[in-house]
Amino acid sequence: MANILTRAYNSTLGIPQQILYRLWRAAKDDEIDVLSREGLLAPELLPVLGIGFSHESDATVEDVIGEQGFGKSLAADILLDPATYLTAGASATARQGAVSRLRAAIRSLVRRSLTLLATRSNTTPARP
């Protein structure tokens, strides 16, 4: 039986992952029909409402790649998890913002330094 965190995740952010896993599992196993409860017609796949269902037919990474060991299972789970990619845009934007702030700070420091040198030597500073 799935715990409440697994049920909540698989019925919200994990829906794309569950669809992918279920399609993959149905393609590998002749006994599973894509349009069945083990496939895409599972009530657990209803956004948010699926939390209240049993989640007994949830697909796992082991269903997809088989028993490959901890390292391969973890790598496949991370690569196939949509939450891995949800934060990519935000972190890239934050990194770009940090780089822009650093460049602005360096430009400001260079301008102040050139202005200070120019006032000491009584010349007009060159634009960097």
Image (tube, rainbow, N blue to C red):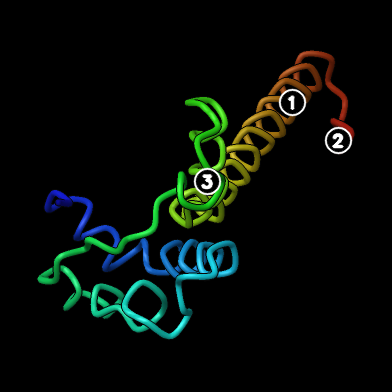
Residue 55 percent location from the top left of the image: 21, 63
Q: Earlier in the sequence, mark 1 or mark 3?
A: 3
- Which quadrant does the C terminus fall into? top right
Q: Is residue 22 left or right of residue 28?
A: left
Q: Residue under label 2, please give it.
A: 128
Residue 10 percent location from the top left of the image: 29, 61
Q: Residue under label 1, please give it.
A: 110
In this rendering, the label closer to the viewer, 1 or 3: 3
- How dense is the environment of label 1, judged by Cα within 10 Å: few (below 14), some, or many (20 and up)? some
Residue 16 percent location from the top left of the image: 45, 68
Amino acid tagged 1: Val
In this rendering, the label closer to the viewer, 3 or 2: 3
Question: Between 111 and 9, which is closer to the camera in this rendering?
Answer: 9
- How dense is the environment of label 3, judged by Cα within 10 Å: few (below 14), some, or many (20 and up)? few
Q: Earlier in the sequence, mark 2 or mark 1?
A: 1
Query: Spatial distance from mark 2 to mark 1, Cα to Cα?
Result: 8 Å
